Structures are given as C-alpha cells and as structure tokens.
C-alpha cells in the first residue's frame, strides 16, 4: 500500500495548502496559536463539500427513509441508497446488498460477533486476532468466547511492532473459524501483510474480518481483490461526520446470518405470531438510520477521489518520513513502532516526561496529538509503557505542521529540563 | 493559561524526586488508585496510630501532576489526625476545582497545585491520590481500586 510508493514517484501536483482551505476548522486558533491538527487517526476533520452535502440534505431532502410516498421521503431514500452505492464503488464490493450502514467500526465488529460468531461457534472453535488490535477488535470476541465457549488466540508482534507472520501462520489450524485483524494498527501505524494472512486463513477454512478503520483513509481499498469476508470502517476517520460507518460482508454470509437488532426497517411483515425479515442490506439496519451521516460519507468519498487516494497516501508517507527523521534527531525521543510498512501514524515517548504531560504542553503550543493507550492497552503492555503520544497525519497536514510539532517537543524538553 | 503555572518548580521537583516513595512495611491500610485516562496508577500504604497517620508511603507510575500531588500529599498528611486530613482534603478539592479559591495558608506546599484548575482534564491527575487516601482510611484494610472514571 502507501509505504510502497517511493519518494521518486511523488506527484508534484498535490497542493496541501489548497486542501487545507477546504477544512474550515483548520483556521481555528488554539491557546493563541494556529491549530496544528495531528490527531486524524482518532477522528479526522470534515471538508466543506461534506458539510455542504449534509446541509443540503437537511435543508432540502430530509424525511424518514423507506416509508412514506411523499416527495421528501423519496428524496431522502434516494440520497441514502445513493450513498450506499457510492460506498460500494469506493471499496469495490460486488453489490449494495453487501454494504450495511452502522454507527462505526465498533458496531460493525459487534454485529459480526453477535450475528455470525455467536450462532456459529462453540467449544473447541478458535478466533485468531493479532496483538496489535484495538479494543474494538478484542472485546467483542472475548464476549463471544464467554457466550459460546470458543477460544481466543493471539498472534504476537515483535519489538518493531510488526506481526510475527510465521507465528500467526503456525496458530492457524482446522479449529480456527475466524481471523479478525486490523489492516493498519491504530496505535503504531503498522501495516499488516493482509493478503498472505487472508489466503492462509482461507486455506484453513477460516473466515476473515478486517478492521479497516485506520486503512481506508490512507490507501485505496478493494474488498473484492483483498478477499476479506467482512470489512469494517468508520466515516469519522474518513473525513465524514461521526456516527456513520460501514460493514461490508460477503452476500452469501450475510444472507445466512440472523438479524442482530430487531425493529422497524429490518422487517417485511410483522404479526404477533410471526415476523418475516427484510432483504439485505436492510435486514441489519433496524430503526431509522443515520441518513445525513451516510450522505456526508458519500460526499467524503467523492472528495477523497477528487484529490486522489494514491496522491494523498504519497503525501502522507512523505510527512511520516519527515516526522520520523526529525523526531529521531531529538534527544530523549523514542519512537514506538518502527515497522518497515507503516501508515501515517507516529507513536513516541519522551524520556522523563509522561505522555499526558507531553500532551498538555503540546496543546499549550496549539499542537493536537493523542496521548494515552489508544484503546490498545495490550500494545502498551508489550512495549512496557503506560501510554504514548501519537501524531497522525491526514490529507491536510504539511511540513510546517511537522516543524511545529518538533518545536513544541523542544518546549516540553525545556519545561522538564 | 500558563504552563509555568501548572509545572511549577515544586511540582517538577516532587515529580523528579517523589518523597515517601516505596512500599511501607507493616502498613495497616492500603488502597490502589487508577486513572484510566492517562494510565496513572498508584498504591498507597498507611500506618495508623489510633486516629493519627503515623507513616504513609506510595508507589506507582503516573504523570508529573499525579506523582507530585501524591508526594506532596504524603508530606502534608503524615502525623495528622484523621479529622484534619478530611479538612485538608476539602481544601485541596476547592483549590483544584474553584477558580476563585484563594490559597489557604494552611495548605503550605500543596498550594503549588492551584495551577491545575486552569487545565480541567488534569484535575483528576491531582485528585487521584486524595481519593485513594480516602479509600484507604475508610477501609482500614486493603481497599478496592479507586478509579477517576
């Protein structure tokens, strides 16, 4: 993916300054300094075309979907289902029946845990995850293990924060029913060798769920080429609003799964004796969905494709390399996660300064980074740190942002001299 | 809002060289404190003599604010009666949360924590040790973990 793009192939046309003008929030001042936003891995900002699409929908087309015959309901339904088709194209799914709108990655994973794993797994069965996973790709499986008696196995990582592929492959066995792994680690930025992992899992008869939350903003994703059985991601890390996300699932798997939540929209007929369920994808969308969120997500995908996903990835890789080199020159900085393939995430600690103090000092300089365990406590335990500071880069970051980060880190070193 | 107001010399000094740090042998009360937001963890050990705190020590790992606050607290409460500690807790709580609270002269070095109130997300870091002390004093024995969440 992105890391494979060499500097020599960088498009000269990428105009980060122009991109920044599309994001009104980047003009904000924080603590008397122009904002430097380096927390896109937690949540990215929305560009004007997304805000305008949401405003246009709410101003001109809002009503409930799939219900009334009146004009606005038809407009809302068209906007919502049009967004689904936009998502299908963005990830190259075979059909809109494979695109389930959810609140976000967490809900997508829980849906698979409760509607696929829980009815299908039992004692003796194994779910295999990696040691890099976000809590959202650990806890739902622990719950399934408690509910069904199946076993959770964890493939280890090395000191660079890379998956130990040989050990992952050795853990696969005929009892492995599901492999659930991130495409990109949120805490460290490590890119996992998914093709090899998916092919090996399939060879053992296991299904594969990919947590794509940190991957979709940084690389073109083609679920058909990737071969994942389930693929989950969030809108708010993809320059869309919060509260909208996507579960992609192979149609034959989704068709065989029972509904997860019951309610309106997911039914065809209801009587007190018997209820029949709706077709895919609506079978998994009980209740009124986040229509404006879906509209915003579709607009974000249009926007990203207008910039070019490859161009964004190349730009971010350039920033990652620059920031990595700059931080390596600072005394007392240790970069946590030095995998050979990384997305635009840089986790680090400063000797003698707790990450939370570092976060406060950087914030006082107007630099927003995430500090904490990044919802990946096992990763922190592995590296024996309570937390790290994490700078993450998006389509709107620049070399100037890196310079401001470095200056703020020097300031932190002064305060704690 | 000024960083210098948060990271005063007293705070930095107690972070670098925490007083009363380590386990306390023969403790008759203890408690664990945890701040999930930043991962601060501390264990507090108390030896009582009747109503009086005869000795107190702590250990753990946390940010500068939580470490310095715990260090300052152990110095402040050692030798004090339970009732005095409760009054001190209330004063520190006001100091950390009320913007118009004037530093009470009885707070001594604890007044250095007044800068924390300008950084609301850090108040929990400073108050963790006090809540943990409350738990230890209330239980008498090993108390359950206190969290700031």
Image (cartoon, coloured by chain):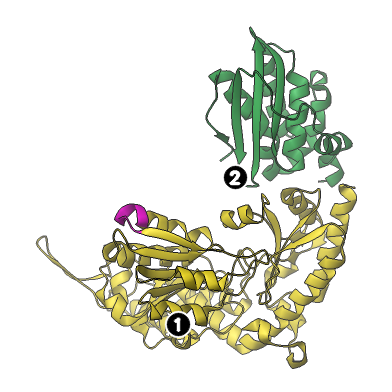
Chain colours: A yellow, B green
Relative depth, front residue between A20 and B107: B107
Mark 1 = which residue? A199
Q: Position of residue B36 (x, y in %)?
A: 59, 45
Q: Residue at x 64, y 8 (%)?
A: B51
When the figure is inspected, residue A388 is found, relative to residue B49, above or below; the finding is: below
Q: Residue at x 54, y 20 (%)?
A: B139
What whole-number distance in Å separates the C-alpha atoms at marks 2 and 1? 38 Å
Q: Position of residue B81 (x, y in %)?
A: 69, 11
Relative depth, front residue between A396 and A149: A149
2 vs 1, front mark = 1
Binning the other alpha carbons within 10 Å of mark 1 as few (below 14), some (14 to 19) or many (20 upward) gives: some
Reply yes or no: does residue A149 show up in magenta: yes
Give left or right: position of A72 versus A319: left
Rendered image: mark on residue B36: 2
Q: Which residues are magenta?
A: A145-150
Look at the numbered disc 1 and give the secondary structure of its residue: helix
Q: Residue furthest left?
A: A273
Binning the other alpha carbons within 10 Å of mark 2 as few (below 14), some (14 to 19) or many (20 upward) gives: few
Q: Chain of mark 1?
A: A
Q: Position of residue A101 (x, y in %)?
A: 40, 72
Q: In which quadrant of the rendered image does the N terminus of chain A lie?
A: bottom right
Reply yes or no: does residue A280 show up in magenta: no
Give left or right: position of A349 versus A173: right
Dominant SS type (magenta): helix
| Residue A374 is at least partly visible in this image | no
Look at the numbered disc 2 and give the secondary structure of its residue: loop
Relative depth, front residue between A118 and A59: A118
Q: Chain of mark 2?
A: B
């Amino acid at each position: 993916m992105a890391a494979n793009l060499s500097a020599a192939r960088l498009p000269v046309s990428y105009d980060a300054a122009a991109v920044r003008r599309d994001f009104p929030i980047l003009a904000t001042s924080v603590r008397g300094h122009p904002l430097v936003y380096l927390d896109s891995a937690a949540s990215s900002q929305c560009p004007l075309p997304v805000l305008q699409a949401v405003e246009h929908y709410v101003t001109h087309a809002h009503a409930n979907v799939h219900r009334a015959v009146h004009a606005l309901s038809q407009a809302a339904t068209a906007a919502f289902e049009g967004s689904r088709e936009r998502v299908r194209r963005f990830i190259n799914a075979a059909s809109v029946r494979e695109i389930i709108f959810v609140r976000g990655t967490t809900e997508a994973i829980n849906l698979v845990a409760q509607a696929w794993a829980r009815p299908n797994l039992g004692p003796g069965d194994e779910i295999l995850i990696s040691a890099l996973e976000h809590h959202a790709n650990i806890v739902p499986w622990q719950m399934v293990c408690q509910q069904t008696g199946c076993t959770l196995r964890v493939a280890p990582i090395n000191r660079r924060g890379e998956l130990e592929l040989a050990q992952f492959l050795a853990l696969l066995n005929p009892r492995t029913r599901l492999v659930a792994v991130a495409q990109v680690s949120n805490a460290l930025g490590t890119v996992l060798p998914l093709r090899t992992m998916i092919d090996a899992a399939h060879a053992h008869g296991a299904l594969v769920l990919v947590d794509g939350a940190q991957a979709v903003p940084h690389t073109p994703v083609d679920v058909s080429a990737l071969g994942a059985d389930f693929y989950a991601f969030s809108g708010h890390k993809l320059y869309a609003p919060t509260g909208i996300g996507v579960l992609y699932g192979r149609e034959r798997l989704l068709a065989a799964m029972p509904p997860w939540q019951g309610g309106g929209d997911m039914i065809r007929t209801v009587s007190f004796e018997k209820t029949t369920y709706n077709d895919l994808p609506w079978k998994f969308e009980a209740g009124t969905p986040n229509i404006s969120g879906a509209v915003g997500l579709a607009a974000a995908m249009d926007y990203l494709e207008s910039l070019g996903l490859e161009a964004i990835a190349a730009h971010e890789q350039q920033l990652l390399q620059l920031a990595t080199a700059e931080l390596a020159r600072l005394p007392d900085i240790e970069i946590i996660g030095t995998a050979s393939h990384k997305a635009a995430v840089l986790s680090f600690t400063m000797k003698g300064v707790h990450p939370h103090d570092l976060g406060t000092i950087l914030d006082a300089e107007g630099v927003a980074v995430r500090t904490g365990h990044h919802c990946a406590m096992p990763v922190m335990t592995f590296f024996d740190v309570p937390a790290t500071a994490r700078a993450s880069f998006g389509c709107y970051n620049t070399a100037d942002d890196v310079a401001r980060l470095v200056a703020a880190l020097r300031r932190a070193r002064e305060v704690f001299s | 809002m000024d960083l210098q107001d948060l990271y005063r010399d007293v705070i930095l000094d107690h972070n670098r060289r925490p007083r009363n740090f380590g386990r306390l042998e023969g403790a008759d009360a203890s408690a664990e404190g945890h701040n999930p937001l930043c991962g601060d963890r501390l264990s507090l050990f108390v030896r009582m003599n009747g109503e009086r705190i005869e000795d107190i020590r702590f250990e753990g790992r946390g940010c500068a604010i939580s470490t310095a606050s715990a260090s300052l607290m152990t110095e402040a409460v050692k030798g004090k009666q339970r009732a005095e500690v409760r009054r001190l807790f209330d004063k520190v709580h006001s100091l950390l949360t009320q913007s118009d609270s004037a530093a009470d002269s009885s707070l001594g070095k604890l007044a250095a924590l007044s800068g924390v109130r300008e950084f609301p997300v850090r108040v929990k870091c400073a108050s963790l040790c006090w809540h943990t002390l409350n738990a230890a004093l209330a239980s008498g024995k090993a108390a359950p973990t206190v969290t700031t969440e």
